[in-house]
Amino acid sequence: MHKIFLTLVTTLCMGSSFAQFNVSGEFRTRGEYRDGYLQLRDSSKMPNLDILGRARIAFDFKNEKFITRFSLQQAFTYGQNYYSSDTISKNTVNIFEAWFKYNFTRTLGLKLGRTEVVYDDERLFGSSSWSMWGATHDIILLQWNASEKKIKGDFGFAVNNVAPASAFLNSYNMRNNYKYLSFVYFSKAFFKDQLNISVLAAVDAFQTYGLSVTKIKNDTQYIYNEYDSIIGYLPIVTKTTSIQEFPDILYARATVGARVDVNIKKWSFMVNAYYQGGHVRDGRKLSSNFYAAWVACQVIKPLKLLIGFEHLSGNNFSDTTLLKTKVTGFSTLYGTSHRFYGYMDMFNTLVRDNMSMGLNDLYGRVTLSFTEKMSLEATYRWFSIPHPYLFVNNPQKGELPYQEVGKSLGSEIDLMYIFKPIPNLEINAAYCFFLPAATMEKYNNLNVGTSKFAQYAYLMITYKPNFFNSDKK
């Protein structure tokens, strides 16, 4: 079998003076203790233990003109399939990535297929690697990479549709997916990488929401006696409800901004800002913003200190007149949320929603690198909201559709330990807890003072073997 495999690799590489073939994998297992993870709990809900898993295998090929990747993935929760069954009924193996890139020149290429889309710190486009299923896009990418000039530029375009495609316009009602996506990314490094500037502009369009349509049909049922004579009647009212879709009505939002990184000896600085405009899916105008900044200092070789602040604009729910026509909440699009807003993932949904109340995050971090293989990280975060109001779902008659609250949401402390005992193997463990303010309890639909101590812990083991590399003899 091994000889057959080598023969196949040799055949693939023939006809080229330079060719590489690589087979790699990833095995990840994460055990979690959830006691307030994702949302606060009261005494009616109990903590939970679970084990999550992910397995990937990737095939990479490269020569002078082509680069390809084909990867398979299984993401699962331990125990979700019958232990004695010879079939997997849930989360079967899926294609995670499948793309090829053709290089017109040494710096310009075209990439087609299903791929991860990752830029900068993954704020707006990321791999979402924390989740077992990750994130990939079906996309076309024109890529320019002039490494000697420290320049990188991408233009991406995607069109999503249902399958099979019909001869005419289809309704696309996958609510979390865009119908159209286009973006431009450009980055340039200066002064021997001490200064890096990147710019990103993206437009994503969505089909408008469908309307619930109710049709009422009035009919009459006659009542007969034993001689078949009509002696009365009963009115019959029949109601049928259906969803009317509007595939020809699309609303698009545009996001544009820049990031600046500066590295001078022991100091590092970052400033990042975006503006978001256009329309949300229901047709209302959109005008929102995001900005962030942090400064870090490598005090001594093993000790690094960092302090930062982030702001995502939100909706002022007390301004009911403005909300009828305009939305001011910022969405982080398709970014990786876990690394930015606390490891307990309390706000992952909020930061992606233009309809949200917004978020402020003031944080500080201490990182101790004992060796190249071992580090300890401690992060403190204080969360708040820009406007002191929460939205009220289905208010009672005479009540306002919002409630006034304090701006503070509470604090989170995350402690994370990373150990890499051998190449390709990483052990990651963390303990996190959240100290909620009254507003956070209300946001989680709990009565003030009834939330239990919120904590979360995990132990994750990741092994990434390299099964085969054609460069190795």
Image: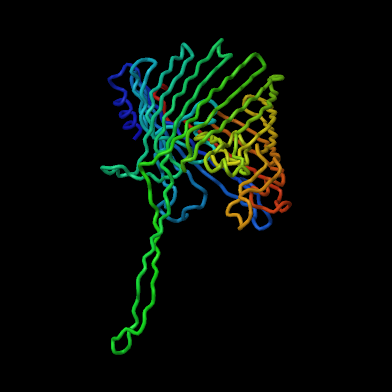
**Count of labels in the image:** 0
Residue situated furthest top in the rendering: 191
Residue 11 sits in quarter: top left
Q: Position of residue 93 (x, y in %)?
A: 41, 44
Q: Position of residue 30 (x, y in %)?
A: 57, 42
Q: Which of the two residues, 376 or 183, is positioned nearer the viewer here?
A: 183
Q: Which of the two residues, 463 or 309, is positioned nearer the viewer here?
A: 309
**In the image: residue 398, left or right of residue 105:** right
Q: Residue at x 42, y 36 (%)?
A: 205
Q: Which of the two residues, 401 or 390, is positioned nearer the viewer here?
A: 401
Query: Is the residue 56 above or below the residue 152 in the image?
Result: below
**In the image: residue 50, left or right of residue 473:** right
Q: Position of residue 150 (x, y in %)?
A: 49, 14
Residue situated furthest right in the rendering: 449
Query: Is the residue 223 above or below the residue 448 in the image?
Result: below
Q: Residue at x 44, y 24 (%)?
A: 184
Q: Quadrant of the N terminus?
A: top left
Query: Is the residue 78 above or below the residue 132 in the image?
Result: below
Residue 270 visible to the viewer: yes
**In the image: residue 238, left or right of residue 298:** left
Residue 459 visible to the viewer: no
Q: Residue at x 55, y 27 (%)?
A: 274
Question: Colour mode?
Answer: rainbow
Residue situated furthest left in the rendering: 167
Q: Which of the two residues, 130 or 330, is positioned nearer the viewer here?
A: 330
**In the image: residue 44, left or right of residue 256:** right
Query: Is the residue 193 above or below the residue 295 in the image?
Result: above
